[in-house]
Amino acid sequence: MMNKTALTFVFFLAALQAGAVSVTRGNYLVAAQEPLAGPPQGPDPVRIYDWSTPGFWSLGPLGPFVAADPAGNMYASSGGGVIHRFDAASQPKPNLKFDVYSLDTDAAGNLYALGPLGQLTSFAPDGAVLQKVSLPYTGPYAPQGMSVTPDGCNIHYFVRPMAGVNRYDLCHGTSLSPISTPRYPDAIRALSDNGVVAVVQNDLLFYGPDGVLVRDITVGDSQTYVTSLAFDTNPGIVLVGTGGAHGRYVERLRLYDGVEVGNQLIGDTVWGLAVVGEQRPASTAALPAAVPSLSTYALLLLGVTLTALAWRRLG
């Protein structure tokens, strides 16, 4: 695997020297670096991957926070309080001055950036500031991670080392009831119905908008740590970035049964993950698939038979 990746990288290095790479729906951004026990030490290249093509393209030594909008615009943090912006052709756009703790986008392509002390700022695709909000929190610790619902109305955020996911309604300027989790999340992703996926080590905990746990999907084993997640262009697929002794991959999992349907070896802990054209599902998409039993088929056959007999008598 490593040899194949190394050879493919040489091939794509020539493509990078020849010109910029255009991204399409389903391409995904990875910010990966060591160590697992954060904070990450120094930026490594933010990479663009395509599931259909081995290897990757590089946006340069950025990260660890990344985001991508439906149009293919890409965002990556770096030291010095800067958000780097790239268009769908991977060409640089004017930077945004902002100290970043977390990045996300909504379905309209607006960017949301979490800064120090719970300061949240949203930007239009052209870089104009749309809104500034101070996310409420109590105690000495400030919010360290957030995610926005696709409609741009609700922010989910967490405050380590406290358990739970806080929610804030941006459209009405009010706090919503928090969602309880076993401990502080390692990563979160807001869902289309205002539910949330919270990562606790190697468990993906899917909660509905009422805060009730819908599903728990376990990734790998006790030596695997899920450090980031995003959804595919198919909302029935979730991508997870991992670290730990059995991690350092991006894995694709089906929601209804938790089965892995693909993976990409990254080699370092995956701190940031974003998908171009990401489709967030509702929390109910994580419900286990209902597999018809023999009794179900038997009842169906009986119903068809009785219906046929009834029609025959009427005839």
Image (cartoon, rainbow, N blue to C red):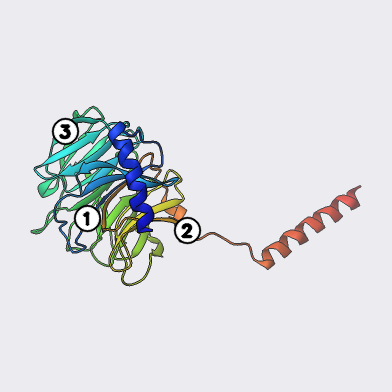
**241 w.r.t. 16: above or below:** below
Q: Nearer the viewer, residue 158 or 76?
A: 76
Callout in the foreground (3, 1) = 1
Which residue is rendered at x = 30% and y = 32% of the image? 18
Residue located beneath label 2 in the image: 287
Q: What whole-number distance in Å separates the C-alpha atoms at marks 1 and 2?
A: 33 Å
The tag earlier along the polypeptide, 2 or 3, is 3
Callout in the foreground (1, 2) = 1
Mark 1 residue type: Gln
What percent of the width, then of the height, locates residue 302? 77, 61
Q: Residue furthest bottom?
A: 222
Q: Which mark is residue 95?
A: 3
What percent of the width, then of the height, locates residue 184? 23, 63
Q: Nearer the viewer, residue 154 or 143?
A: 143
Mark 3 residue element:
strand
**160 w.r.t. 7: above or below:** below
Residue located beneath label 1 in the image: 33
CB-based contact (under 8 Å), mark 3 and mark 1: no
The tag earlier along the polypeptide, 1 or 2, is 1
Which residue is rendered at x = 31% and y = 58% of the image? 198
Mark 2 nearby-residue class (10 Å; few <14, some 14–19, many ≥20)? some
Callout in the foreground (2, 3) = 3
Mark 1 nearby-residue class (10 Å; few <14, some 14–19, many ≥20)? many
Mark 2 residue type: Leu
Mark 2 residue element:
loop
Which residue is rendered at x = 81% and y = 58% of the image? 305
Q: What whole-number distance in Å separates the C-alpha atoms at marks 2 and 3?
A: 41 Å
Q: What whole-number distance in Å separates the C-alpha atoms at marks 3 and 1?
A: 23 Å
Q: Nearer the viewer, residue 56 or 280?
A: 56
Mark 3 nearby-residue class (10 Å; few <14, some 14–19, many ≥20)? some
What percent of the width, then of the height, locates residue 215? 42, 62
Quadrant where the image shows the N terminus: bottom left
